[in-house]
Image (spheres, rainbow, N blue to C red):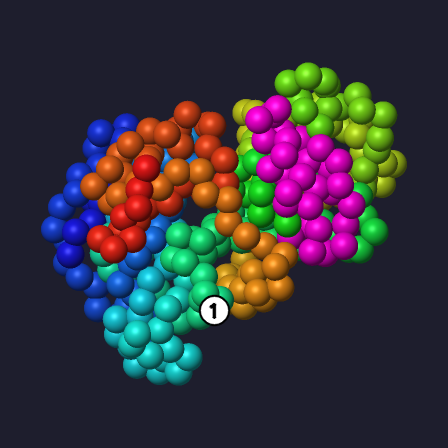
Amino acid sequence: MKAAVITRYGSPDVLKILDAPKPTPAAGEVLIRVHAATVNRTDCGELRAHPFFMRFSYGLRRPKRTIFGLDVAGEVEAVGARVLSFKPGDRVFGMCPSRSNGAQAEYASVPEGAVAAMPAGARFDEVVVCEGAFYAHAVLKKIHLKPGDTILIYGASGAIGTAMVQLAKASGAAVTAVVATRHLELVKSLGADRVVDYTSEDFTRIGETFDFVVDAVGKASFFRCRKLLKPDGVFSATDLGPWGQNVVLAIWSWITQSNRVVLPAPGRINGFMGLLKSRMEAGQFRAIIDRKYSLAAIADAYRYVETGQKVGIVVICVAAADESAT
C-alpha cells in the first residue's frame, strides 16, 4: 500500500510517499480502506517532536510509529476475530490509536470501539473531525458544562474550537467565541451567541464574566484571562500553554482545591464516536473544511497546518476517487 512514511523527526520534507506493508487486523480490530484522513496540530507536533520532552512518548531518537494520522474515514476491508459490529463494505469513521500507525495511508487497522458507522448520506471528507471533537468534548466533560452555563472560547476557528462551539451549544450553554475578523460569520453560523473580534478589541475587557473560559489554541493564559472569570469560574485549555504554565497551574489548583485551572484527560475513545454521530445526525455538528490535499501532496498539507492559519480541518483525500483536492 502507499503511505506517508516518516522515519525521522524534522520538517515536512522528511515525509516520503512509499510502499508500506498492508496491516492485518488483530482480534477486535477492523481493517479500513482509507478514503479520507487529516493533518492537524498533533501530527505537526509529533513530526518535529515539539516540545522536546514529548520524545519520551513519541520515541527518543526516531518516531516509534512511521505513519501518522488520527482521523480516519473509509470502508471496512476486513475484520479481525471477535468483531461484531462491522462487516466488509461498511462505511465507517473514527480515530486511530496514537501509539500505532495511523490513517495517512491507503489502509489502517483500528480497534472496533474507536470507529462508528457513518451518518447516512455523509461524505468521507465530512466525518474526519474526530480528533478535534474528541479533545473539545474532553474539556467540556472535565469542566462539567451544563445547560445555562456561560463559556468563552478563545481560538474558536480551529479544529478544536469549531468543535467546541458546536458541542457547547448542543449542551445548552451560552457561547461567546473569540476569533479574527475573517472568521466572525463562520462561528456565528456554528451557533455562537456572541462573537468577539480579537483583532479590533481586547477580548479580556469586554465587560462580562463567565463560568468557564477555554483556550482552544494554546495562545492565551490564565493570568491574561482571569478577569473574565466569575468568582467561582474555571479556566481550561487544550494545550500546555506558554512555558507549560497550564500544567503547573492545574497541579497547584488541584493541591489547593481551588479548581481555578483544570486540564482535560482525554481518556478512552470508546463510546465517543456514537455521541459524535448522534450530534451529526441531529444537525448539531458539522465539519468545517479548510483545504483538501491528495496523499501525494501531504507534505504541503503539513506546511500549511504549521502556518497556524487553518480553519477547522485539513483533509487528506487518500482514495483516488476522493481526490477532489485543492
Mark 1: secondary structure? loop
The amino acid sitting under disc 1 is: Ala
Q: Position of residue 80 (x, y in %)?
A: 29, 77
Seen in the image, is 146 located left or right of residue 272? right
Residue at x-position 72% and y-position 19% = 202
Depth check: give the residue in front, 190 or 146. 190
Residue 103 percent coordinates (x, y) = 31, 53
Q: Picture coordinates of residue 295 (x, y %)?
A: 24, 45
Would residue 99 appear left or right of 77 to someone viewing this image? right
Residue 282 vertical position relative to residue 44 in the rendered view, above or below: below
Using the rendered view, name the quadrant where residue 88 is placed.
Answer: bottom left
Residue 21: give x, y in percent of width and height.
Answer: 14, 58
Which residue is label 1 attached to?
Answer: 120
Task: Decide which of 132, 281 is in the foreground and name it.
Answer: 281
In the rendered image, the quadrant that contains the N terminus is bottom left
The stretch of residues the image draws in magenta is 167-195
Position of residue 221 relative to residue 27, above or below, is: above
Q: For mark 1, does the 10 Å Cα neighbourhood hold few (<14), some (14 to 19), or many (20 or more) residues?
A: few
